[in-house]
Amino acid sequence: MATAAPYGSWVSPITSDLLATEGGVQFGHVDVSEDGVYWTESRPDEKGRTALVYKPHDGEPVDLVPPDFNVRSRVHEYGGGAWFRDGQVLFCSSFDDSRLYRIDTPGARPRPITPEPAEPHALRYADGRVFAEARLIVCVRETHGEGEPRNELVVLASDGSTSPQVIATGRDFYATPRPSPDGARLAWVAWDHPYMPFEGTDLCVADLAADGSISNDRRVAGSDQESIFQPEWSPEGDLHFVSDRTGWSNLYVERAGKVQALTNEEAELGYPQWVFDLTRYAFLADGRIACLFTRAAIDGLELLDLKSGRVESVDLPYTSYAPSLRSSGTRLVFAGASPTQRPEVVELDVQSGRQQVLRRSTELEFDPGYISIGQPIDFEGADGLTSHAFYYPPTNRDYSGPGDELPPLLVHVHGGPTAHVTNGLELSIQLFTSRGIAVVDLNYGGSTGYGRDYRDRLRGRWGEIDIEDSAAAVRFLADRGDIDAARVQITGGSAGGYTTLMALAVRDEFASGASYFGVADLVTFHDDTHKFESHYDEYLVGPWPAAIDVYRDRSPITHADSIRDPLLLLQGLDDKVVPPSQSEAIVEALKQHSIPYAYIPFEGEGHGFRKAENLKRAGEAHLSFLAQVSGFELADEFAPIEIENLDEASTRRRRTETRSASPTGPSSTRQ
């Protein structure tokens, strides 16, 4: 029989240690050859480093890089495309010095093939491919020095015998340089400020000479209103790519100078290009194309028959796939997660149907009695339009809530904001739900996974649509009788942290907040952030500097005097995307007005936490903070964090006075 106990006080097997170690392994780029499968693993228990792993088809997984080698790139600060191969010869970017290294045989010591720059990390490499009978590499290079970093396409000898030579320059950004199978042509994507790659890009093709130089370049597709994703040559030499020209991202091909659509789905084949070398479709030996489509924020593996034009779903349990899909013959390799299973690297033979799990992010088997499954909900959001989320009710087979109590709610706002959440198993959510705390994971207007029109709801309205949708989700769940509207905390990281800070300043639905490296000042952020995102705010807020008054009004720091409820801030001190100064500005405002707060900086962490000890500390701090400000006792034995200015009576009084002073109740907006 389940024991009745206050929400938040339940004993849970989902611990902070589990969150930091067993739940923290993340799989990145995968690849497959005739001999075996490759993938990367981000390992919190190895100080967050990324390892490159290889599994022979008839053997066990082995690491291909030494324990002191971190396979990551710093290009665009977000990286991606940090490794590639030619047969069994591997090429990797080292996070420690940003040089490109070559590994000739498994177990061999990596040797650098790019020159050492005058200043550390001044030359960075990503997204490479080998061509010209394995003699040459083409890749993206980012050069740092005076002024804004310079992004170019370069060609270098694969053995390091010649220095990189620039073959394409003059655009603000380059990505996905892809030589054709015969080595005669090169395709790539380029774009310029103020656009992000998921707003507007150009797909270009040029003739490729034996020495790596290019000529006769032309634009195949793209514009400032069309995003091109994953150009890829078929084995026959036809250029395929994904475009969102119809408002949904579908697959296209260029043949004889003409572009034709291969799919016409109301779904998303493309993916926000925050990092390099994302792949969402792959060619199969039988002529079909495997595709990862997202429909209403749920991922699915589907097979396109080119003869009939039909797309057929593959029956698999996964609802969330990493944007990395590769093929060899009839084999597909990917990393997928289900609502009850953490991500796992999977090999699937589409001809025989044989499926093999190659590696799990954790070997633990989760009792379904402790797992809350995200339920899709639709509700009336900003501007009276339908918005979306996944609701996770408190779930623990050993406990039930008291009959006279409703659970507190955690409103999670994803980062990006050009991104979305699925309902794949996330231990960071189960950490709360298994203790009796409800969670709603928002896909507010502006999220991906629902078509370009839905994403464009946020154009010029960041700090409005996301906040109103957050508040609307609370009202929806409160009206439905699911949650205690007086105990609602809003939380998120990066852009989600920004929404958290703004919501606490201008809305009354939230009794507390937890910001992970959130943007606080849009004006200083415009000048302080890195090149890749330096004009992203013009899409989200308005033209710079013409709309500077809007930037000020949408900045949490402008409204910091209105924050009356407790706030937790967690910040990586090495964050180059959202510098620590952003969180520190909010801390100073909270100090001046004696608002309850806790600020925890993390040494050696950037934009997102990777190290096991820091993932553990962040999880415990968040639980402790929520328990203290929401009035419940955790069953966990870790030490509570210290919250400055916390006085339960005054905090409760401040919250009550705020709501009673509002003529429209908890759905009001502060002025």
Image: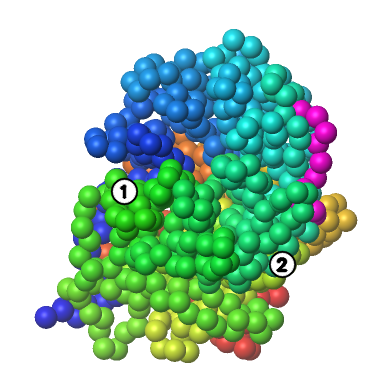
Which of pointers 1 and 2 lies earlier in the amino acid sequence?
A: 2
Q: Which residues are magenta?
A: 214-224
Looking at the picture, tell me which residue is in the foreground, 647 or 221.
Answer: 221
Within the image, what quadrant is residue 316 found in?
bottom left
Residue 347's spot in the image, x, y percent? 34, 49
Q: Main secondary structure of the magenta part?
A: strand
* Secondary-structure class at tag 2: loop
Within the image, what quadrant is residue 647 found in?
bottom left
- Direction left: furthest residue: 1
The residue under label 1 is 361
Residue 447's spot in the image, x, y percent? 60, 65
Q: How many marks?
A: 2
The residue under label 2 is 246
* Whether residue 644 is situated above or below residue 576 in the rendered picture: below
Amino acid found under the numbered disc labelled 2: Thr
Within the image, what quadrant is residue 496 found in?
bottom right
Looking at the picture, tell me which residue is in the foreground, 5 or 547.
Answer: 547
- Give the distance between the C-alpha atoms of the residues marked 1 and 2, in whole angstroms: 37 Å
